[in-house]
Image: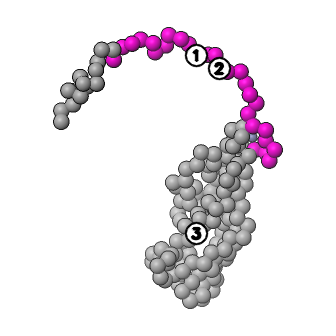
Amino acid sequence: MPLLVNIRNLEKESARLEGELPVADFAPDFKDELLRFVEPLSYELEVDRQGTELTVVGKLWTELECDCGRCLQTYRQELLVDEFAALVPLEGEDAVVVKDDFADLTPYLREDTFLALPTNPLCTPDCRGLVPKAPDRDLRPGDGASDGPAAGVSPWDALKKLKL
Ligand SMILES: [Zn+2]
């Protein structure tokens, strides 16, 4: 479920929203070499409507699984957006998606969460990186050494097989 707020009710009074957004809803396509979302995004928000605009303020938090950029160790780190604030237009080009009086706030939460991601994750601020180790001598010669049928096959033979 995305995070929806009833904009009709907001004409009367502001709304307080608390809960969790599953990773599949707020970051379904997120891909990063060093970072992964592993917990739902928690939110505590106050939503206020002023005419054709919503103001959303509050905080967001979750936990990340990170790979240290220096030593590659995996560790967990809290991600906190302490002063989340968004102006959500109900009309115009950038208007929020509204369906049956419900506005979807998910994209706004997603944007600020992504902006708060660490750009250079380190397990500790003074991580010294990988300890150099001896080169791996475990390669077995001989494996995959058979010349196989590739020998004697010219690129032209391969081309001839292609029916154009
Ligand atoms: Zn490290």
In the picture of the structure, the residue carrying the numbered disc 1 is 139
Q: Work out whether 121 lies above or below 147.
A: below
Q: Residue at x 73, y 33 (%)?
A: 130
What segment carries the magenta color? 123-150
Q: Residue at x 28, y 20 (%)?
A: 154
Counting residues from the N terminus, which is met first, the one under dot 2 or under dot 3?
A: 3
* Residue 99 rendering spot, x and y as whole percentages: 45, 75
Q: Work out whether 45 lies above or below 38.
A: below
Tell which of 120 and 107 is nearer to you: 120
Q: Work out whether 43 lies above or below 62.
A: below
Tell which of 27 and 12 is nearer to you: 27
State yes or no: discs 1 and 2 in contact (Cβ < 8 Å). yes
Label 3 SS:
helix
Identified by mark 1, the residue type is: Leu
Counting residues from the N terminus, which is met first, the one under dot 3 or under dot 1?
A: 3
In the picture of the structure, the residue carrying the numbered disc 2 is 136
Q: Quadrant of residue 160?
A: top left
* Marks 2/3: CA–CA distance: 48 Å
Quarter of the picture containing the C terminus is top left
Q: Which mark is residue 108?
A: 3
